[in-house]
Amino acid sequence: MWIWRAWHRLSASRQRLPQGFSVALGATVFESSPGMIPWEVVQAWSHYHGYTHAEMALLDRCIGAMDRVFIAYWSERMKRRMKK
């Protein structure tokens, strides 16, 4: 549970990456896509909560894996939305 709590709480620090594409009649659409939660934020969270180095390393690996799943889900959702 502590890993889920950290991931949800640190999601506010997630970087947003701008993306744009052109559509018919010369219009351009810009959206931002979610990026990974920065390592420095995970490190600060770990330090604040007094985690050991091993706990911080585990948290970092888990948050990275959770981010990859979340970003893949988000990307797939956007692809389906664009097809409509």
Image (tube, helix red, strand yellow):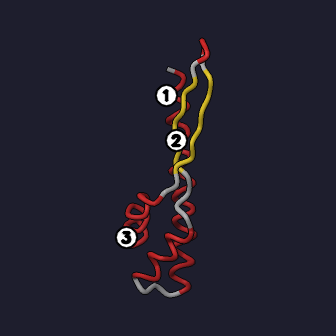
Q: Quick one: SS at disc 2?
A: strand
Mark found first going from the N terminus, 1 or 2: 2
Q: Amino acid at mark 1?
A: Arg
Circle 2: residue type: Ser
Mark 1 is surrounded, within 10 Å at the Cα level, by few (under 14), some (14 to 19) or many (20 or more) other residues, namely few
Within 10 Å of disc 3 (Cα), the crowding (few <14, some 14-19, many 20+) is few
Query: What whole-number distance in Å separates the C-alpha atoms at marks 1 and 2?
Result: 14 Å
Discs 1/3, front: 1
Could you say which quadrant of the image residue 40 lies in? bottom right
Q: In the rendering, which numbered label is found on residue 1? A: 3
Q: Where does label 1 land, which residue?
A: 81
Q: Distance of mark 1 from mark 3, alpha carbons? A: 32 Å
Label 2 packing within 10 angstroms: few (<14), some (14-19), many (20+): few
SS class of the residue under badge 1?
A: helix
Q: Are marks 1 and 2 in contact (CB under 8 Å)?
A: no
Nearest to viewer (mark 1 / mark 2)? 2
Q: Amino acid at mark 3?
A: Met
Using the numbered discs, state the Cα–Cα distance from disc 2 to disc 3 in whole angstroms: 29 Å
Residue 25's image quarter?
top right
Please give the name of the residue rendered at 55% of the width and 52% of the height, measured from the top-left corner: 35
